[in-house]
Amino acid sequence: MPTDCISYQNSGYFSSLMNDYLDQKPNLKPLYNQFPSLENFEGQILEKKNSYNNKNRLILVDVLKNQYSNSSISDLTKQNIEAISNSNTFTVTTGHQLNLFTGPIYFLYKIISTLNLTKELKTKYPDSNFVPIYWMATEDHDFEEINYFNFKGRKFRWNKESKGPVGRLSTDGLADFFEVYARELGTGKNANEVKKLFKESYLNHTNLADSIRFLANELFGKQGIVILDADDQKLKSIFIPYIKEELVSRTAYKQVTKTIEDLKNYFVQVNPREINLFYLEDNLRERIVFENGKYKVNNTKIEFSENEILTLLKNHPEKFSPNVIMRPLYQEVILPNLCYIGGGGEIAYWLELKSFFDAVKVTFPVLLVRNSALLVTDKQTKKAEKLGLNWSDLFLSQNDLKNKTINKISKFPIDFSVQKEYLTQHFQALYELANETDKSFLGAVKAQEAKQIKGLENLEKRLLKAQKKKYSEEIDRIVDLQNELFPNESLQERQANFSEFYLENGIDLISVLLKKLKPLESNFTIISFGNTTK
């Protein structure tokens, strides 16, 4: 195959906003701080060093040590936690939901992007330390988004009721789930490793936060990942001034609403609420709304006066949970963070927040689109070569791929562009004639042109349909390959669970990804297993 990567902009899977961000279009410059390049981190380091409250470091280290107190911890992760107390240490962060058994495989790509960027930064800026952080989205409450994963085309769903923050959710019931999943895994060394990993992660821990911490630590602990659960009273105490600002002044709503006006030519990822906070208890996470002079917890009878809710904030900040608009601010307040790594949708909503950060005087991080990959086997690579396909062909929509294939293998042209251009030139002469004689004739000329162009288009479609039928076997082979690599006509990384690839490759899956993924290169990386030395 002629290429082993495809730029995000040419992949067809990124929004116009992300493409323009990656192309550094001038109209988006006010929406971010430093663009992600190795050189630009020099200014980001200086800005964060001058703005971050170093008193927060000791609180953060204390919280992390407590959260890891019952965990086996690698020497490198331990060193990274200790290093946070030093003023020359900075973090690089990615965040993710607590998807069952990681959910889609891009969970791995997020963390590997984070690990690899810290290594590159250390090489470039040896006088500073860089700690990779995985921020667990323990306070999310949309259980339906995380209670399943796909394995070999089948959806494995954990059926359970959940109302509160998912990090506190009991793992009861996963033993029955595991029995079904284990049967599908089969036998063998790698299958047994996957089974062991699931059992130790979920059946030996009582809640989802501890389960995911164990799982991520098993996969990436040796690489030094530091896993943070921000659902913590001490960390929320640091954030009290910003929660108060949100309750009283509605700054986020005002600033983000203005920014959305500047993004009117793009799809807006999230919209702010008047108050971007939830009220949090073990089995409750509901929006705080302001109605008739009272702060009310939506869908409950709980309500507060302003004095009452500010007193609650002072005494129990852990009862306040930031939503998607406020969570990034919470992250940047408590962490000495330089960069946030996320998918296209995440970076899109971060771009809405720059003016909000400016208003509350918090340094805005570098925004980096995480790595993406397409994992292929040698057999699939050879099949693509035999079919005469480039990787860029396989990234096309299925309909476009079929049409391109037919135009390529057909013995005569199916594209009638030349004929359409001839018609257009022919009718141009009729337009000139009508202008010189009877202008009322223009409408009839225009209608006749549209009719004949439409006729050519219909002939083109009929011919294409006939050729598809004629070459149906060739088309089917190509579609079958694309469906293997792009299940449900979607990105593999958003569909398949890592265990599907671990079965074939074992721990090599992680080591190859660590080697191949380059965080500052905005490309889909094509990784062929069985021939990974190229």
Image: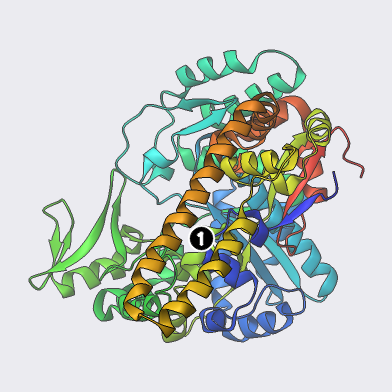
The outermost residue toward the left is: 292
Position above or below: 416 against 273? above
Residue under the image location 74 percent in, 23 percent down = 190
Mark 1 highlights which residue?
346
Where in the figure is residue 360, as x and y percent of width and height?
42, 83
Position above or below: 432 against 212? below
Specify few, some or many for label 1: CA neighbours under 10 Å numbering under 14, 14-19, or 20 or more.
Answer: some
Position above or below: 500 against 75? above
| In the image: residue 56, left or right of residue 22 | left
Residue under the image location 50 percent in, 59 percent down = 345
As helix, strand or loop, the secondary structure at mark 1 comes to helix
Position above or below: 122 against 137? below
Front residue of 215/88: it is 215
Front residue of 237/481: it is 481
Residue under the image location 65 percent in, 67 percent down = 91
Task: Name the quarter where the N terminus is drawn.
Answer: top right
Front residue of 141/8: it is 8
Residue 493 placement: quadrant: top right
Task: Name the quarter where the C terminus is drawn.
Answer: top right
Q: How is the image coloured?
A: rainbow
| In the image: residue 511, left or right of residue 337 | right
- Is residue 22 in view from this perspective? yes
Where in the figure is residue 285, as x and y percent of width and height?
29, 51
Where in the figure is residue 108, as x and y percent of width and height?
65, 45
- Is residue 78 in view from this perspective? no
